Amino acid sequence: MLLPWSGKKHQECTKIVYHESMTKPLRLELDRSAKTPLAEQIRKGIGAAIENGVLAPGARLPSWQDLAAQLGVARGTVRSAYEKLSAAQLIVASRATGTHVADRPSITVRQDQAPDPGSFMEMYGELTAGPAIFQMGVPARETFPATLLARIRSHAVRAESSAPAVYPDPRGELELRRDIAGYLAVARGIECVPSQIIVTGGFSSGLGLTLRVLGLEGRKVWIENPGFPFTRRGLELARLSLSPIPVDADGIDVDYGLNHAPDAALVVVTPGQQAPLGSTISLARRLRLLDWAAQKGAWIIEDDYLSELQLKGRATPALASLDRAGRVIHIGSFSKTLTPALRLGFLVAPLPLVSRFAEVAACLSPAPGPAVQLATAEFMRDGHYMRHLRRTKRSYAAQGDALLKYLRPRAKDVAIAGLAVLMRMPDGAPDLTIARETLSFGLAPAPLSLWHASTAPARSGLLLGIATSPLKRIEASCDRLFEIIDRLT
């Protein structure tokens, strides 16, 4: 049966093909003015119908003579299309039974499912959702030198494309490693050589690489409590035994760790600005921690997540700058200073482990592509990075002061904590529920309770990112936040 078609006469047309064994009509679109041959158009149309389930396995197709008559094309045109479909094993032709759709494995289309409620990935999605006001962990868009960095990156991409097709250095491009070593000497007080620098895909990549190198599965590790939940989960996945150590105004409580887990093989700390409380580890505790690690042969991973982005005064030198026994592995990234979209970071390997780090990087975790590295190296080498940090610190300091101004009249306990304002709430206050409720209003404060290890009572509070609190929107955002708090508490 042949039905009239729609469209331009003798040009574009849609034909509906029927056959007595077909449960659904087959719609074939033909365009006689197109450059694509009619045989190919027929092949694509029938092939798509088979793939989409319009033609089920076993469905009988018209003979190529009948289909040619229905479509108003030459018999050879349909025969050519059928031959190609048969070669692709989509149809089977037989003199006895005619032409049928070939049997195919049943395919279950799996939809992208939301994470299980209460799972780590649900928490991960909530803490990284954005862009939103008060979101932590991401820099301000207003201070990001997008135009300049895009121009530099475009040059680097062209250079990469025209370079010989060879495998890049898995440790990272030498130019970037040189610039990072120079930056660390000036800004963080770390004396190192480029061979000690391993370029990574950010802090998480550096942490994974370090744990592979150290091979401490089953051993105890000190973690800050409260501390970064992603790091805590990463250590669990690496099969280390977690020993939560409390944090106070002087940073991680080293004496508590020595009394409760003296046999630990690893410590993971944020000594510059503790995440999330913002305290800086005191000099006495730094020296005590380094002395214990040297005596016991333990390792220290220094998460320098904010680098020198200290809003008041100059940042304290890195813990690695005091290390004389080679027990500190310093990990930094450009996620907070530039953008997490770069997926770019670095670590400083102690000299005895340089070869081991290089081997593991080469075989299991090579550095990101050269283009992003070379662009970042040029950005640092020409002085743009340091100027960007100075501008960013001034902007963030103003935003932090403004945020405190609007919070203090209505909150009892608020303080700057790194690049966030920590607003403590009464114990038992539903900070997680409050944080989730704010998402629909374009706000994304982080609940403090998620940063606590499950072995200790969780303190309640909200962490409000300073970088993502533009001055012109702070007042309205704070008003909305307190409306939600008042309603849920």
Image: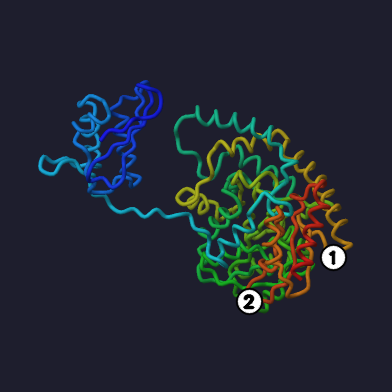
Provide the residue designation for mark 1: 411
x%, y% of residue 257? Answer: 67, 74
Report the side of 12 relative to 428 (left or right): left
| Residue drawn at point x = 47 percent, y = 48 percent | 362
- Whether residue 253 is visible to the viewer of this picture, yes or no, is no
| Residue drawn at point x = 50 percent, y = 63 percent | 215
Q: Nearer the viewer, residue 456 or 58?
A: 58
Estimate the spatial distance between the alpha carbons at disc 1 and disc 2, rounded to whole Å. 28 Å
Q: Nearer the viewer, residue 464 or 163?
A: 464
x%, y% of residue 90? Answer: 25, 42
SS for callout 1: loop
x%, y% of residue 237? Answer: 52, 65
| Residue drawn at point x = 34 percent, y = 53 percent | 107
Applied colour scheme = rainbow
Amino acid at the residue labelled 2: Thr
Q: Is mark 1 in CB contact (under 8 Å) with mark 2? A: no
Mark 1 surroundings within 10 Å by alpha-carbon count, few (fewer than 14), some (14 through 19), many (20 or more): few
Query: Of circles 1 and 2, which is in front?
Result: 1
Closer to the chain start, of discs 1 and 2, is 1
Report the side of 296 relative to 411 (left or right): left
SS for callout 2: loop
| Residue drawn at point x = 70 percent, y = 56 percent | 444
Provide the residue designation for mark 2: 455
| Direction bottom: furthest residue | 259
